[in-house]
Image (cartoon, grey):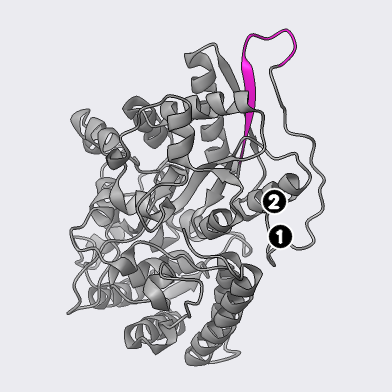
Amino acid sequence: MKFRMTAMAAGVALALGAAPGAQAQGSQRQDFTMWYGLTGQLSEAVQQVCKRFNDSQDQYRITCTSQGEYDKNLQNTIAAFRAGQQPTITQVYDIGTLDLMLSGQYVPARELMQGQGHQIDWNNYIKPIANYYATSKGEMLSFPFNSSTAVMYWNRAEGKKVGQETPPATWEELHAALGKMKAAGKSCPLALDFDSWVVFEQFASAHNIPVASKDNGYGGLDAEYVFAQQPLMRQHLNNLHNWYKEGLAGIRTREGGQNVVAAFASGDCAVAFASIANHQTIMRSQTEGLDWTPALIPMYEGHQRFNTRVGGASLWALKGRPEAEYKGAAAFFAFIAQPESEVFWSTITGYVPVTRAGYDRMVQEGFFKKPENVGREVAMESLLLENQSPLTSGLRLGNGTQFRALYANEMQAAFSGQKTMDQAIDAMQTQGNQFLRRFQQTYRGKTLP
């Protein structure tokens, strides 16, 4: 079965060169390729990982190429596959996982490693991370690579000015602190954007709220969005809207010239919600003397905290490449799963380790106690909370990219006064379910692995 076209891939024209194939002439190494969807400093970090692998041995050589953002990489991979020019490995972000699973055009992780003679302790992978890329039986289909979760970035100096010595643990406490900051003259207490990942998806996980039926889609392709029926979700999104109208929050988007991370790093805004992966970006770009820390995202009073879910992406070995390339791919996957490789990756980025061995190595080496890393442990704390449920594993819902775009459009409409927040929430659910039904029709007759 070939990749089926979804709305995300419709109209994608193949404008890509052929992926490098077998062993290069005059070389003793087996060449193979990886495409990924990271840019800027994170793209540079991927290139460092690939160079370290190439320098570590003389049998294989990986060529790693950025295709732009996550969605563009997936589009290009689908287009290249249809033309028989797919890379050996491709990086697919969390919400694109279902597309790969149902395509069947990949070599399952366990099958690949066994076939190439690598002994892997699959239980070594941190469960909340592994679950996102595993079958219903718990067998991982791809390799977690750049994994993260959501945190609150807190300006300690601004907090101390208004008597908030520690990061707020509840949304109610945060609201009070933002009000005091505003009264003290802070023009942007909180930076908000229209990305669904933190204040919608991760918020739902931490509060154990269903985004969709059938355990957020893990139970079948006939799942439906149900978030509009969740009172706490309505309350939360309306609260954020009200904070904006009260001047407690400012909209900061890339399109507007300054995203939430840049707004926080510059000191313009005192609080921001983003991925722990942005930790190094803030460290490198912060205004001089910025006093800040990551913290757990707040909870509403009276609600038990559950784990936040993993974000980021995983690496898939694609079918249809020369057999010799899979030896290189397996060697690369084994290399990046080594504790020292995970320490290196986490050091040059803000991503978390994906294995217990990697995490233990970082703890033993005092990684989280170093001044430049203080606070990063909250991401692991958030992922590894004992309170976990089927609702906190992730979202296995089709056309996820389209839904995130829909969320952004509806939030923008609400915040600009074109409609009420409740109208925006209802529209998101109605149109989101239309996306799910189209995806289900595209893959009619298929069942989740």
Where is residue 31 drawn, in percent x and y? 64, 21
Depicted 320 relative to depicted 59: above or below: below
Of residues 241 and 161, the one drawn nearer to the viewer in this rendering: 241
Depicted 388 relative to depicted 116: above or below: below
Which numbered disc, 2 or 1, marks the residue that appears first in the sequence? 1
* Residue 146 visible to an observer of this rendering: yes
Which element carries disc 2, helix, strand or loop?
helix
Of residues 139 and 433, the one drawn nearer to the viewer in this rendering: 139
Q: Residues within 10 Å of mark 1 (few under 14, many from 20)?
A: some
* Residue 248 visible to an observer of this rendering: no
Check if residue 233 falls in the magenta segment. Answer: no
Where is residue 185 drawn, in percent x and y? 37, 71
**Which residue is rendered at x = 38% and y = 32% of the image?**
337
Of residues 279 and 45, the one drawn nearer to the viewer in this rendering: 45
**Which residue is rendered at x = 45% and y = 80% of the image?**
244
Side of 139 where 60 appears, left or right: right
Residue beneath label 1, please? 9
**Residue 78 shows which numbered tag?**
2
Inspect the image, locate mark 2, and give the three-letter code of the amino acid beneath it.
Ile
Specify start and end residues of the magenta stretch as a single range. Answer: 24-35
Q: How many marks?
A: 2
Depicted 241 relative to depicted 217: above or below: below
Side of 97 where 377 appears, left or right: left
Q: Residue furthest front?
A: 445
Side of 388 where 318 appears, left or right: right
**Which residue is rendered at x = 43% and y = 26% of the image?**
335
Q: CA distance from mark 2 to mark 1?
A: 7 Å
Which element carries disc 1, helix, strand or loop?
loop
Inspect the image, locate mark 1, and give the three-letter code of the amino acid beneath it.
Ala
Q: Residues within 10 Å of mark 2 (few under 14, many from 20)?
A: many
